[in-house]
Image (cartoon, rainbow, N blue to C red):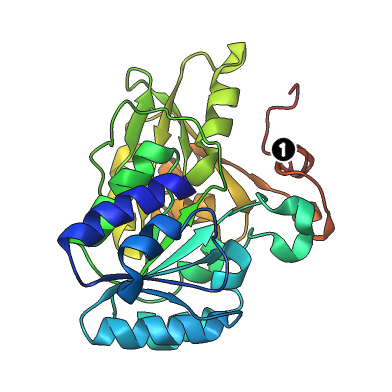
Amino acid sequence: MRNTFIEELVSFARIDSKIALVVGDLGYSVVEPFAREFPERFINVGVAEQNMIGMAAGMASEGYHVFAYSIANFSTFRCAEQIRNDVAYHNLPVTVVSVGGGLAYGNLGYSHHAVQDYAVMRTFPNMLIAAPGDPMEVRACLRYLVNNRGPSYLRLGKAGEPNYHAEPPKISPGQWSLVRGASGKNAFLSTGACLQIAFEWANQPEYHDYDIYSMPLWSINSKIIQSDIIRQKTHVITIEDHLLDGGFGSWLLEACSFDLTVMCRISIKALSPIVCGTVGSQSTLNKFGGITYPKL
């Protein structure tokens, strides 16, 4: 996803001279194509992520759409106050780009887990969550963000994610994007890189009649349409590499909280808090946290 992000960003930057990229002294072997072609719009702020967001907000106030890029835990938790005060409250076109959401950097220690980031970011005013499930959805998200500027949080997988779409899908906030199936009554609904895990579950015999959907864009404003979609389903299972509290499944339950007949159709697969103090590979921690199929 990282390389796809840079490829797409470079293509937009060739058209729009107000697209800029700032990084917190990382991303090398990924960000160089942008830095080489647009050195005047590429800034390495050093190991100073809070300053990175402040600088991005200042540039955005002068007409730039700034992409602030770092590993997920650094660009969110370390910068929460700056994102809230400088970006979200002022409704500025800054896209906070987090690489390695969930447990992608789990082998570096639990300080690098990003399993509470949805909970933090989705509470900020004007904030749009962009969590693509494959490289094609990365392209779709970039195209939407560039054409609908505002505060946004782009959560990318680390590397090696397979393509499930043949081309970038048409997406909008709150829209369920059908990835596989025939729009039946049962569904797996994922956001972000958990699309791959949704396929692991749906490939099991007991879930043979479950379609697979992805929701790469969601926000507080797109809650309103969810209950009408779920009312057409018998059972919906959400999957996320995030803790249950404040995550994607919780967001969906909140969207349907006025109608208990709809809420009861939703089941959530989210990470157990046990992963918060645990170190291991992404696949090991996802299994330990309870979101992968038990037989895998």
| Identity of the residue drawn at 48% across and 52% down | 253
Provide residue 78's location: percent of width, then percent of height.
Answer: 61, 78
Quarter occupied by residue 46: bottom right
| Identity of the residue drawn at 50% across and 81% down | 45
Residue ID for mark 1: 283
Check disc 1 and report its element: helix, strand or loop.
helix
Quarter of the image that includes the C terminus: top right
The answer to whether residue 266 is left or right of residue 38 is right
Provide residue 196's location: percent of width, then percent of height.
Answer: 54, 32
| Identity of the residue drawn at 35% across and 48% down | 7
Q: Is residue 290 above or below residue 12?
A: above
Mark 1: which amino acid? Answer: Ser
The answer to whether residue 257 is left or right of residue 287 is left
| Identity of the residue drawn at 17% across and 65% down | 16
The answer to whether residue 208 is left or right of residue 113 is left
Q: Is residue 275 above or below residue 17?
A: above
Out of 104 and 201, give the one closest to the viewer.
104
The outermost residue toward the left is: 15
Q: Is residue 182 above or below residue 155?
A: above
Can residue 126 be seen by looking at this rendering? no
Out of 211 and 144, give the one closest to the viewer.
144
Provide residue 134's location: percent of width, then percent of height.
Answer: 44, 38
Provide residue 38's location: percent of width, then percent of height.
Answer: 31, 67
